[in-house]
Amino acid sequence: MPLQPSQSFTSTTAETSPNPRAPLQPQQVSPNLNSSPQPLPNTNPTPAPNPSPITPPPQPVPAKKRRGRPPKPLSARKPPAPRTINLKPTLRQERSYSRDKKLQVITFLAQTKLPRTREGPAPRRRQGAAETDADPAELGLNPSLTYRDVTLKEASEFFKIPHSTIEGWWRRREDILQGQGRKRKGKGGKGKAEARRVRVGDLELEEQRQDGDVGRT
C-alpha cells in the first residue's frame, strides 16, 4: 500500500526530532592538539613580597684639597747657592730646625753637584736622586768634567746637622714640601709635659722654702 504524503512527513520528522522524554547524552568534545597549555591559576592567597631595592656601594670620599698654591717640586726650586759647594759653612750645631732650614738642606741635596775626582765605578746613588749624571752644560758647569750628587755625609759635615736627621728629612721630603709636620707615634705626650711642668714647679717651690721666702708664719 503506498504511503500518503502526510504520513511520510510525519514519520520523517519523528525520526529526526529528539524525544523530549529521552535522557540527554553527554556531548563528546574532541581534544584540541594544537592549543598551547594554559597556566594554572594562582591558588596561593598570600601575595609575593616585593624585592628589596639594591643599595649601591658607598662612593670613596675624595681627598680634601689643600688651600693655596701647590708647592714647587725640588727640580723647580732655586738652589741655595751656585751648583757647587761654595756656601758659608755652618759654624755651630743647632738643636731645632725650621721648615726653611729643612727645605734648604733638601734642595741642597737635590740640586748641588760636585766634580768627580776619582776614576772607577760610580758610587751608589741616594734614593730619590737622579738615575744618571746631570749634563754639565744644562747646569752651567764645566762640560769637560763629570759631576756627581752630594752625599748625606757631605751635607751633614757642611750644615753641622747629624747624618740621621738629614736622612730623615730626605726620606720625608714630600711631606716637608707639603708643609706637613712629623707624625708622632704613641699617646701621652701632653701628659708627660704636664708632669714635667709640675715637677719643675715643685722644685722651685722647694728652693723658695729653703731661702725662707715661703712658709713663714
Image (cartoon, rainbow, N blue to C red):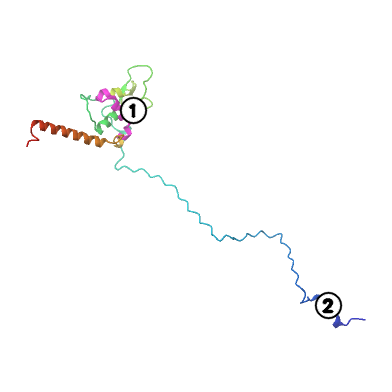
**Residue 138: which numbered mark, if any?**
1
Q: Identify which residue, 3 or 100, lies in the foreground.
A: 3
Mark 1 or 2, nearer chain start: 2
Residue depicted at 83% across the width and 77% down the height: 12
Quarter holding residue 190 = top left
Q: Quadrant of residue 147?
A: top left
Which span of residues is magenta-colored? Answer: 156-176
Residue 111, image x, y percentages? 31, 28
Q: Residue at x 19, y 33 (%)?
A: 199
Q: Residues within 10 Å of mark 2 (few under 14, many from 20)?
A: few
Look at mark 2 in the image and give the residue it sits on. 12
Q: Residue furthest left?
A: 217
Q: Amino acid at mark 2?
A: Thr
Q: Secondary structure at mark 2?
A: helix
Residue extending furthest toward the top = 119
Instruction: Report the quarter where the C terminus lies.
Output: top left
**Secondary structure beneath label 1:** helix
The kind of residue on which mark 1 rests is Glu
